Image (cartoon, rainbow, N blue to C red):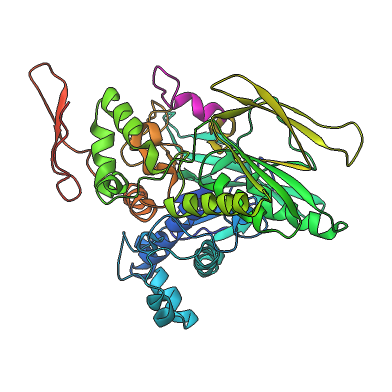
Amino acid sequence: MDREPGRAGPDTDAAGEGTDPVAVLDVLGVGFGPSNLALALAVQEHNERSPASGRVAAAFVEQQAAFGWHRGMLLEGATMQVSFLKDLVTMRDPTSPRSFLNYLQGQGRLADFINTKTMFPSRVEFHDYLEWCAADVRHLVSYGTRAVAVHPVPGPDGTVEELDVVLRDAQGDTASTRVVRTRNLVLATGLVPWLPPGVQRGDRVWHNSELLFRLADLTLAAPRSRRYVVIGAGQSAAEATAHLHDREDAAEVHSVFSRYGYSPADDTSFANRIFDPEAVDHFYAAPGEVKQMLMDYHANTNYSVVDPELIQDLYARAYQEQVAGRQRLHVHGASRIAGVREPATEGADIEVEVEFLPTGRTHTITTDVVVYATGYRPIDPSGMLGDVGAWCRRADDGELLVERDYRLHAVHPLRAGVYLQGPTEHTHGISSTLLSTTAVRAEEILDSVLGHRRPVPEVEHDEAGEPATVGPGRGDPGVITS
């Protein structure tokens, strides 16, 4: 059986579950959002400068029919919260031809973008950049394909250095199954929308991730005035509130959240160091209580916070309507949803019971649509890993143990690599699900796959035996005191 590196690709695998693959991959990536896209670009650039014998055989699968990243929230005027320099490649290799700046040059907009005097492109433009990158590595990706199971491939001595991954390809109304064999599996399955317990999506109860799609359906319906309720205190909730308030059909928009007011995101320079690549070294080496302290201190850089400019904009809108005597935007701070009663009759009002927390008093808002901007949760990969997951160690709290190079900590007999991109906040810090370290993380995973595993930062200990300082890692990360 041919198992030479560089001889496999997404179209060279045997079809049909239970058949032997004709070749073995070095890397199979599951999910093709920005994280695995960045890895695909790193692989592509490595292969472009390597002889045939040193190239990496890689393939990626994505269950969507085409590349897409939060398409339901590509709102007009919404901007990125991360600098364009933290694109998919620049922090790994500033000379890469797949940078955002090179994309702008190719589109004929480089000078025009510079004249905007901003570090933060629109979300629509950055998504176009991501699609531009995805098109460049299209030959590595199978769209409309899901990974449904992972099986170990024991060697003669019982060790498992390869994995068989069962893939299901959707083709119209039919589906076919095939098996791909790989030495390393990189899981980047993203986050799933989260709704409070008991809440079910429906025609008029949405998660904000589907906002634009749902609004497009409303546009096709008969024109009418509509009332909207948005639940949530973060950036997405505030953006959804502003977007709905701008609609011609919006008779009223109610924003409901448990904070007294929207909290501003901490985007100051020192706080933003929490998103630096060196901060991953610091966080990984820190004891558990320091990890929790850092997460608590800097949650306001990312979670349930809003850009100050958007907060001011929403406040100005509400105030001007108060002056004019016609209130369309209503902000219900220090409040929670006590109940949502959907009508038995189609098209009748939804009743949302809102409790004002300081007094406990409730009132009812009648509305046409409820939008939950309540965030996302990571996907536990255990269900797909099956028996392989039993060889991946977990901490006492049930979280998967992850090495510094994002490889799951495995025990005998598993020697094949299983890597996580995304759900590693507990080990690698707050940037794990964000774009900030995506390019560098791709490089670290590729280095690990190539056998150039980056050493874990050296940790000095104090007299009590507790970690006290972090020694040189990437760029001498400095000191953490316990």
Percent across and percent down for residue 66 are 64, 60
Q: Quadrant of residue 455?
A: top left
Frontmost residue, 421 versus 100 = 100
21 displayed left or right of 482: right
Frontmost residue, 443 versus 213 = 213
Question: Measured along the vertical axis of the image, is residue 378 above or below residue 91?
Answer: above
448 displayed left or right of 473: right
Which residue sits at x=43%, y=25%? 399
Question: Measured along the vertical axis of the image, is residue 90 above or below residue 349?
Answer: below
Residue 169 within the segment the image draws in magenta: no
Percent across and percent down for residue 239 are 56, 51
Which residue sits at x=57%, y=38%? 232
Residue 387 within the segment the image draws in magenta: yes
Percent across and percent down for residue 277 are 28, 49
Name the residue furthest left: 463
Percent across and percent down for residue 353 are 71, 27
Give the magenta range: 386-399
253 displayed left or right of 297: right
Q: Is residue 144 visible?
A: no
Question: Measured along the vertical axis of the image, is residue 163 above or below residue 135?
Answer: above
